[in-house]
Image (cartoon, rainbow, N blue to C red):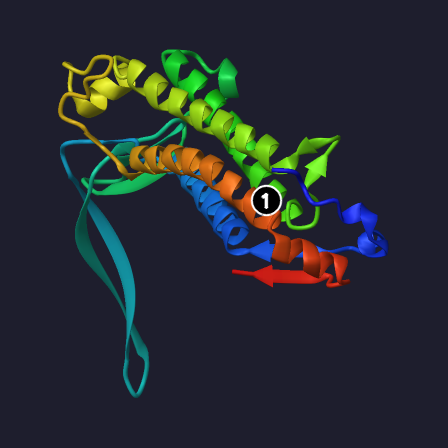
Amino acid sequence: MSKPNYSRHKTSIMCYMIITGGSLVWFLLSLIADMFVVTAIVTPKWLIGPTAQAITLSTVKYAASTDNQTLATAATTTYRHPSVGIYTRCKAIREAGHHFTFHCGSFDLDGFSTDSEIYPSPWKAAMFFISLGFVLLTLTVLCTLISCCRQSIFGKSLHNMTACAQVTAGISVMLSLFLHPMGWSASRVQLLCGPDAEPFYAAGCSLGISFYSAIAGVILCFVCAGISLKAESSNMRTRVKRRVEGGDRLVCIP
């Protein structure tokens, strides 16, 4: 299918924007995929520990009276499961006495230079690939917006280039899904899941929401790459061409 030549009309010097149902769905799904991937990166919920730990929470209450205020401290107990992500973890930390507090933080103290005993090498590789996928996917979200105003760059279809980038992002995030289980034999994981933990076997641990978020991001990456073809054909319809050549700067077609 030949592309409409908007440059043949004098209105080509004007800025125009084409919004179709296909391009809108493409943008929204690309944005959702990007959010899934960044959720998988920052949340420490790739593996969930089998045993819930009691955490003591202290709350301060004021009992008001006519003369003064009485300060009262109430302690409540909640149960939390320790967990670990790509570079973060959540665990219970003992404070004064027998009280525990729940603390979440990162363990990649020196980035990729962190000791492999603390930050397993497969997880470093997983972090690299999922970060690469996130960067590519973020760029494609911007490209979906640019495609409303411009159909090609350097003589190449912007939709096709974006689709290729989304496929590459999906493959990159998929690699991180395979690399993370390769580090399950690390002492950190064995302490969390049990001594039987080994690559691709998490022993007593279960997969957390972060792992499933990465899977959802991968699926949406490939779905978005397919939708880009539909979005491109929608922008090439005769109705769109006629309205652009007619001088419309904003073209909205379902």
Q: Is residue 226 left or right of residue 19?
A: left
Q: Vertical placement of 191 versus 49: above or below?
A: above
On the rendered image, what quadrant is the N terminus found in?
A: top right
Residue 159 found in image quarter: top right
Residue 191 found in image quarter: top left
Q: Residue at x 48, y 28 (%)?
A: 167
Count numbered badges in the picture.
1
Residue 16 found in image quarter: bottom right
Q: Residue at x 72, y 57 (%)?
A: 244
Q: Is residue 254 left or right of residue 184?
A: right
Crowd band around label 1 with a 10 angstrom C-alpha radius: few (<14), some (14–19), many (20+): many
Q: Identify the amino acid type marked 1.
A: Thr
Quickly name the residue at label 1: 144
Instruction: Return the x and y of residue 151 as percentages of the image width and height.
Output: 68, 42
**Residue 120 showing in the rendered view:** no
Q: Residue at x 59, y 44 (%)?
A: 144
Q: Viewer-proximal residue, 209 or 6?
A: 6
Instruction: Return the x and y of residue 128 as percentages of the image width and height.
Output: 49, 21
Q: Viewer-proximal residue, 25 or 234?
A: 234
Instruction: Return the x and y of residue 142 as percentages of the image width and height.
Output: 61, 43
Q: Vertical placement of 251 versus 206: above or below?
A: below
Q: Vertical placement of 5 versus 167: above or below?
A: below
Instruction: Return the x and y of residue 50 as percentages of the image width and height.
Output: 14, 32
Q: Viewer-proximal residue, 119 or 133?
A: 133
